[in-house]
């Protein structure tokens, strides 16, 4: 089982794959376009006639330009997304993600076999409630404490999972989120959380899946803050340079390595420090061993 928090996940649509063929036409793409994107029957027939073929990005752009010109942007985008998703599902250059931890972002549902919901994101919705009546404020505070207590129980379960405790936590979820307080806004919010039971309780069947993706969200903000300062790069090489160096700095920070020392070692071609790639591989193997020993 492979999982990624949302902000660590690079979707195939953004063009980061280095493989020459990154768009896959065929029966699977056609099924997505028909069942999920609901494109017109006319274009379903056209795409079906293409058959099982791969296109690189420039070739696909040329094909779609011939079909649509500058119009029909919605269908064009659907084709780009569906063919990229199908390619991603079958490529071997990067791990295919089985479970993705995210907020309520529905655009990720086609990329992974399962979506797990972020508890911190869900909890923030309760913080947004602004009761005016003192009784409502007291009800909200009481429920939020019960919410935090349940979340702490999930954290403890994740550290030491068991079948019996998983079943118990499932029942506790039903009891907690079946609550009705009489504060309409709070009750509506509780019902929305209850509707996401399967996504929020992924950890009960897959204890290795995180309860939240908050750390990844914070990492994603690094790029946003950089953009606030420098706006956008003027060229594609500039975009790549910013992405590369931001990734190097943030990866070094996560691994406890000095980015300055690492870059200095590379630029001076001494290669005395372990490469980041090798450090990541070692960390992954250690995580696998820890998971297997549970």
Image: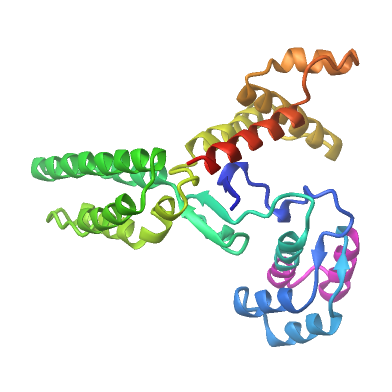
What colouring style does the render use?
Answer: rainbow
Residue furthest to the front: 293
Look at the picture and state if 198 lies above or below 28. Answer: above
Q: Position of residue 41 (x, y in %)?
A: 69, 87
Viewer-nearest residue: 51 or 221: 51
Name the residue: 57% across, 62% down.
113
Question: Relative to 279, is 199 on the left or the right?
Answer: left
> Dividing the picture into quarters, in which one does residue 87 lie?
bottom right
Q: Position of residue 67 (x, y in %)?
A: 84, 76
Magenta residues, as a range? Answer: 58-79
Name the residue: 70% across, 68% down.
82
Name the residue: 73% across, 51% down.
14
Residue 173: in magenta span: no
Residue furthest to the left: 135
- Please identify the dominant SS of the magenta region: helix
Look at the picture and state if 237 lies above or below 176. Answer: above
Viewer-nearest residue: 85 or 40: 85
Q: Position of residue 275 (x, y in %)?
A: 78, 25
Look at the picture and state if 222 lies above or below 137. Answer: above
Name the residue: 69% across, 15% down.
258
Viewer-nearest residue: 72 or 141: 141
Inspect this view and state whether residue 196 appears. Answer: no
Residue 64: in magenta span: yes
Inspect this view and state whether residue 93 appears. Answer: yes
Q: Position of residue 131 (x, y in %)?
A: 19, 44
Question: Relative to 97, is 94 on the left or the right?
Answer: right
């Amino acid at each position: 089982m492979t999982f990624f928090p949302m902000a660590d996940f690079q979707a195939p649509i953004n063009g980061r794959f280095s493989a020459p063929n990154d768009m896959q036409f065929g029966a699977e793409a056609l099924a997505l376009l028909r069942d999920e994107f609901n494109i017109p029957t006319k274009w379903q027939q056209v795409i079906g006639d293409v058959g099982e073929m791969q296109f690189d990005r420039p070739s696909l752009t040329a094909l779609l330009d011939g079909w649509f010109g500058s119009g029909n942007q919605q269908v064009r985008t659907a084709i780009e997304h569906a063919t990229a998703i199908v390619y991603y599902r079958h490529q071997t250059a990067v791990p295919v993600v089985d479970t993705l931890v995210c907020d309520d972002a529905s655009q990720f549902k086609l990329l992974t076999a399962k979506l797990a919901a972020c508890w911190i994101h869900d909890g923030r919705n309760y913080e947004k409630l602004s009761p005016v009546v003192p009784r409502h404020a007291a009800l909200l505070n009481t429920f939020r404490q019960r919410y935090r207590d349940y979340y702490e129980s999930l954290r403890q379960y994740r550290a030491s999972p068991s079948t019996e405790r998983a079943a118990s936590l499932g029942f506790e979820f039903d009891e907690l989120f079946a609550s009705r307080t009489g504060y309409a806004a709070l009750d509506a919010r509780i019902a929305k959380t209850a509707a996401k039971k399967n996504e929020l309780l992924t950890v009960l069947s897959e204890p290795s899946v995180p309860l939240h993706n908050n750390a990844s969200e914070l990492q994603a903000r690094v790029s946003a803050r950089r953009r606030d300062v420098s706006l956008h790069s003027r060229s594609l090489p500039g975009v790549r340079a910013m992405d590369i160096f931001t990734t190097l700095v943030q990866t070094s920070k996560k691994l406890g390595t000095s980015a300055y020392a690492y870059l200095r070692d590379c630029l001076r071609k001494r290669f005395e420090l372990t490469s980041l790639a090798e450090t990541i591989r070692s960390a992954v193997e250690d995580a696998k061993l820890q998971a297997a020993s549970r």
